[in-house]
């Protein structure tokens, strides 16, 4: 399975992660890096 890496501010990471899950991507395949201070 593909892994999805999302790196941005917290709200964008949450939004993109939710969009991926809505499209059927398993949450375990979504990795994130929240950039605080942006």
Image: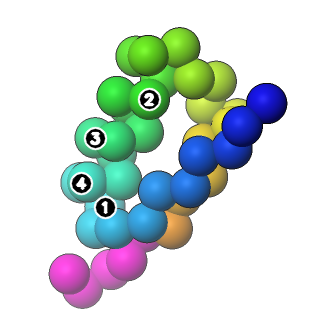
Q: Residue at x 69, y 44 (%)?
A: 3
Q: Residues within 10 Å of mark 1 (few under 14, many from 20)?
A: some
| Rendering coords of residue 31 (x, y %) | 61, 52
Is 27 rendered above or below residue 16? above
Query: Of the residues tagged 2 and 3, which is closer to the observer?
Result: 2
Structural distance between the alpha carbons of marks 1 and 4: 4 Å
Is 5 rendered above or below residue 36? above
Query: Of the residues tagged 4 and 2, which is closer to the observer?
Result: 2
Circle 2 SS class = helix
Circle 1 SS class = helix
Structural distance between the alpha carbons of marks 4 and 3: 6 Å
Label located before the other in sequence (2 or 3) = 3
Residue picked out by circle 1: 10
Structural distance between the alpha carbons of marks 2 and 1: 15 Å
Disc number for residue 35? none
Residue picked out by circle 4: 11
Front one among 36 and 23: 23
Q: Residues within 10 Å of mark 2 (few under 14, many from 20)?
A: some
CB contact under 8 Å: marks 4 and 3? yes
| Rendering coords of residue 7 (x, y %) | 43, 66
| Region in magenta | 34-38
Q: Residue at x 33, y 80 (%)?
A: 36
| Rendering coords of residue 10 (x, y %) | 31, 61
Residue picked out by circle 2: 20
Residue picked out by circle 3: 15
């Amino acid at each position: 399975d593909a892994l999805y890496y999302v790196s941005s501010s917290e709200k964008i990471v949450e939004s993109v992660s939710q969009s991926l899950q809505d499209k059927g991507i398993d949450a375990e395949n979504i990795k994130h890096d929240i950039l605080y201070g942006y």
